[in-house]
Amino acid sequence: MSMLLSALVADLKASLSDAAAQFRAADDGDFKRLLGVALADMQAKRPITKPGEVGLFALQARYAVQAQDFAALKTHMWADPANTPKPWEPSYPGLVPRVAAAWDGVAWWLEFSPAPTMLQITVWGDTFRFWYFARHLLSETPDATTINPADRGLLLLRAQAEAMRELAMRNVVKPQQMRDGYTSMPRNGTPAALFESLLAEFKGVR
């Protein structure tokens, strides 16, 4: 089935049945937002790992991450123990700096604590290679959506749960009829009950 954003929106609307009428934003904005919430949870459920790198400079502690889809630092390959001199050797570079990813409200940075020294760069290299978790993407461009087609139903299931949560927050208590995106089974219940049921099903999927 199509993984284009428009196709996902159409299927989400259809699955919500009459409840879809409660979401009235222009240009299907509500449904895109619901899918966006689901997409964020898919990062934990179905993470994407990609490689990245930055060039290091002595005594510089902060480096801009160039990857536009960066979500979190996973691990790095710098400071290979096999290539590290022993503590009693003159060329011992000291302890490996701690590295963390930081978001400043505009961009992601890698922060070294303390900053790498010239000796460390000489021993371990001036290229810091790492693995990072990437953000998922929904797109109208063919093959640009990063969700695996096999997980299409899982994405819709989480979006449906979010829709029921919002209806419950609006104090909608009338039972809703829908068909869940993962098993395609019909569901009936209040929005609050459906939210709990759908979210539990999403969390239970391996």
Image (cartoon, rainbow, N blue to C red):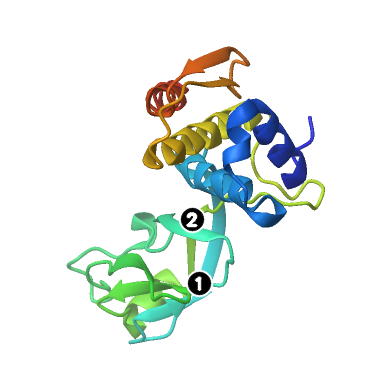
Q: Which amino acid does label 2 sit on?
A: Tyr
**Image: 32 above or below 60:** above
**Image: 40 above or below 54:** above
- Asked whether the beta carbons under mark 2 and mark 1 sit within 8 Å of each other, the answer is yes
- Relative to 93, 83 lies left or right: right
Question: In the current view of this chain or complex, which residue is farthest to the top?
Answer: 185
Q: Nearer the viewer, residue 95 or 193?
A: 193
Residue 150 in picture, x, y percent from top left? 66, 27
Q: Nearer the viewer, residue 57 or 35?
A: 35
Label at residue 65: 1
**To which residue does mark 2 refer?**
132
Give the quarter of the image for residue 52.
bottom right
Image quarter (top left, top right, bottom left or bottom right) of the N terminus: top right
Q: Residue at 76%, 39% (x, y): give it.
A: 7
Residue 47 in picture, x, y percent from top left? 51, 42
Q: Distance between the residues labelled 2 and 1?
A: 10 Å
